[in-house]
Amino acid sequence: MAKETYNESSIKVLEGLEAVRMRPGMYIGSTSTKGLNHLIYEIVDNSVDEHLAGYCDEIKVTLNKDGSATVEDNGRGIPVGMHAKGMSAERVVFTTLHAGGKFDNASYKTSGGLHGVGSSVVNALSTWLDVEVSRDGNIYHDRYEQGKPVIELEKGLLPIIGKSKKTGTKISFVPDPEIFEHTRFKEDDIKSRLHETAYLNPELKIIYTDLRGDEPDTETFHEPDGLVGFVNDIDKTSEKLHDTVYFSGISDDIKVEVAFQFCNEFHENILGFCNNIYNAEGGTHITGFKTAFTQVMNSYARELGILKDKDQNFTGADVRNGMTAVISIKHRDPRFEGQTKTKLDNQDAAKAVNKVTTDEIQLYFDRNIDTLKTVLSCAEKAAKIRKSEEKAKTNLLTKQKFSFDSNGKLANCESRDPSKCEIFIVEGDSAGGSAKTARNRMYQAILPIRGKILNVEKASMDKILQNLEIKTMINSFGCGFSEGYGNDFDITKLRYDKIIIMADADVDGAHISTLLLTLFYRFMPELIYEGHVYIAMPPLYKAMPKNGKEEYLYDDEALEKYRKRHKGPFTLQRYKGLGEMDPEQLWETTLDPERRKLKQVEIEDGRMASDVTEMLMGNDVPPRKQFIYDNARTAELDV
Ligand code: TTJ
């Protein structure tokens, strides 16, 4: 590499990128598949910013055969002229932390949480990154390797490699295998996220192409119905009770957009976005909406005589029973808090959403009395169920006062240090028995569960709370439960750092894992978001060679490798289920922290989250299996 590539300020800059390579997790959350996919979102977000600024209506995202990804837009093109730092502005974008493409103060920044950390982070974590900018009739070229520029500039300016009448930016990069555990982008996650971006930006067209398979897979995401289309999509498998309601408005310089619909379901599903970024932990925009909605619905209920003078108000949960809503705001200076920095914190957002919701929803309901009545009857139904639940809940809370150790069939561990403790939820009494014998009593608790647990998506709250298995789990974990991000759940009280689902490696086992994940996702989502939930991976085979050591093989790929590697005869024992292993085998393969394989359960945010819900809870069986197996293949190993 030519020495001239560097000057004093670029050396400082490279030290910054070195820091990114040293601690990638700090910048992209993780180096798992989730972190990997973030690289693409990070680059795409720059093009979306250009769209929001009013200059780009098409983005192409291509996954190439060589493992690289290409993002191309028809915006104005990253500026290539000389920047104050003595190099091309484009170089500043890709080598300065937090510079991003945000030269334009008039547009909304997508930065917040893990997002918007800057294209320089993507550059730092890529084996190579290639830039082509079309502007002023020329195509300019630049290239980096592990974040370092490899093209010599003449008088600080980029080389011109062609002519073009169009404008735009095209970025290609390959994620660095020195950084990432896996470097294969996961098509389903990326498609979901791009689809979500299309819903949030109805005038934007996103063309996705996967060239990695034998046949190219192309999909165009363009959703002119915007949030209404988003809500309809989330509800596509549910029985809808009315047409999706949409309203928007601006208050205090904050743009607010809301779409909602009620279905014949027991739960609420409310997604919040700020500047196109999903807020997994919710925040002030959601609070503002909820407060306004509860207040307006109660005053309608009184006006219409549904609530009499003596009646108590509906609760917030009552009026949201069966609701799907997407709330999207645009804020010039978003702040985020929370464990994963995905909770919107700006107080003015609560006020603005409250005001727009109060005004617009009344305008709507005054003209659509039928919808109003439908929504209020959902609230009435919920209030009725709530009253019977309150009894069930009281029972549960009294139970909780009993000794933690005599909790159902829980065999608790001795240590009370949550950071060291683990709880295994084991399918079947016989595997449960072996696990109790085999475990490390100090730190490992075993909770056997019988057969299939209740599908919480198909049951009402009082049924759920009466279910012994579910009660035992809630009591053992120690944090209570809530629907979504509620006040009743307290993760600081969690008694185990790891909650490990241990089920057979077959379809039934996958189904049980799915039901458990559904339960956690619905009532204790923080357990998943904060990485406490794992799936144990028992081996599929044991290879016993004539001479040499026995070896456990965890999947068919491992078996194939073993066959290639191992010369000479061997017997292969296939495990059908956990119940077949004796305690010693169970310890060696599945319990021993030194040798076992665990998969951490991760949920992609945004639309993916709602898709997962759908996959988990929906009526189609095949997609359910998909969720479990997909994640089982790509989730991280925690050996
Ligand atoms: C900034 O203000 C002057 C005109 O161009 C604006 C700009 O930065 N536009 C822009 C950046 N469009 N697209 C990008 C971009 C696209 C990708 C794929 C990646 C990055 C880092 C920026």
Image (cartoon, rainbow, N blue to C red):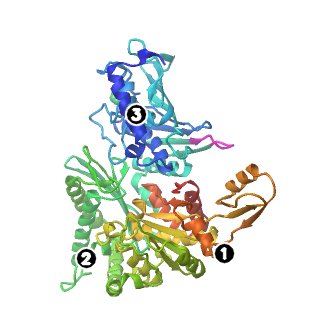
Where is mark 1, residue-wise? 580
> The residue under label 2 is which amino acid type?
Ala
Q: Earlier in the sequence, mark 3 or mark 1?
A: 3
Q: Residue furthest front?
A: 547
Residue 55 appears in view: no
Question: Which percent across, then down, holds residue 510?
Answer: 59, 68
Q: Is residue 554 left or right of residue 404?
A: right
The segment highlighted magenta reads: 209-216
Name above or below for residue 463 compared with residue 24: below
Question: Which percent across, then down, holds residue 310?
Answer: 19, 86
Secondary structure beneath disc 1? Answer: helix
**Res. 301 mark:** 2
> Mark 3 to mark 1: distance in Å?
50 Å
Secondary structure beneath disc 2? Answer: helix
Where is mark 3, residue-wise? 18
Name above or below for residue 83 compared with residue 527: above
Question: Which percent across, then down, holds residue 22?
Answer: 41, 39
> The residue under label 3 is which amino acid type?
Glu
Q: Contact (CB < 8 A) between labels 3 and 1? A: no
Image point (40%, 77%), residue name: 476
Q: Residues within 10 Å of mark 2 (few under 14, many from 20)?
A: many
Q: Is residue 493 left or right of residue 435?
A: left
Residue at mark 2: C-beta within 8 A of ligand 1: no
Q: Which of labels 2 and 3 is toward the front?
A: 3
Q: Nearer the viewer, residue 516 or 569?
A: 569
> Mark 1 to mark 2: distance in Å?
59 Å
Image point (34%, 87%), residue name: 395
Q: Earlier in the sequence, mark 2 or mark 3?
A: 3
Q: Is residue 555 left or right of residue 393?
A: right
